[in-house]
Amino acid sequence: MPSVYLTPALISYLHQFLLALVITTYLGWRLVRPKRQPASGPDRLLASFFVMVTLLSLGLFLERKTSPPAKPPKNNWRGWR
C-alpha cells in the first residue's frame, strides 16, 4: 500500500476538490429539486462544467497522493575556502 505524503500540493488539490464538490452538489440539488420551472440550458451547462472541474480536481489529488515528493537537491556548497 503506498504511503500518503502530505505535501502542500496534495493539500491544495484536496481543498480544491472539496470546494468543487460542494459547489457541484449544490448545483445538482438545484437541478433535480421539484420546482415550478424546469432547469434552463445555462443551469445545466454550469452544473456540467462543475462536474468536470470536480473530476479533474479528484484526478489531480489522486495523482499527487500516490507519487512521492520530489527530493530536494543536495547542497554541494562547501562554504568559503
Image: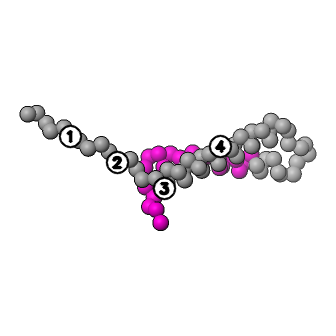
User: Could you give the CA–CA distance between mark 2 and mark 1, rounded to whole angstroms?
Assistant: 15 Å
Between 81 and 51, the one lying in front of the other is 81
**Which mark is first along the chain, 1 or 2?**
2
- Magenta region: which residues? 1-27
- The amino acid type, in three-letter code, at marker 2 is Lys
User: Could you give the CA–CA distance between mark 2 and mark 4, rounded to whole angstroms?
Assistant: 30 Å
| Front position among marks 4 and 3 | 3
Left-right relation of 71 to 14: left
Q: Which residue is mark 1?
A: 76
Q: Which residue is mark 3?
A: 66
Q: Is disc 2 placed on a helix, strand or loop?
A: loop
Residues at discs 2 and 4 in contact (Cβ within 8 Å): no
Tell me, yes or no, whether the highlighted magenta stretch contains residue 24: yes
**Which mark is first along the chain, 3 or 4?**
4
Between 1 and 13, the one lying in front of the other is 1
**Which mark is first along the chain, 3 or 2?**
3
For the C terminus, the quadrant is top left
- The amino acid type, in three-letter code, at marker 1 is Asn
**Which mark is first along the chain, 1 or 3?**
3
Q: Which residue is mark 2?
A: 71
User: Could you give the CA–CA distance between mark 4 and mark 1, rounded to whole angstroms?
Assistant: 42 Å
Dot 3, how many residues are within 10 Å of its Cα: few (below 14), some (14-19), or many (20+)? some
Q: Which residue is mark 4?
A: 53
- The amino acid type, in three-letter code, at marker 4 is Val
Rendered residue at 82%/51% (across/down): 32
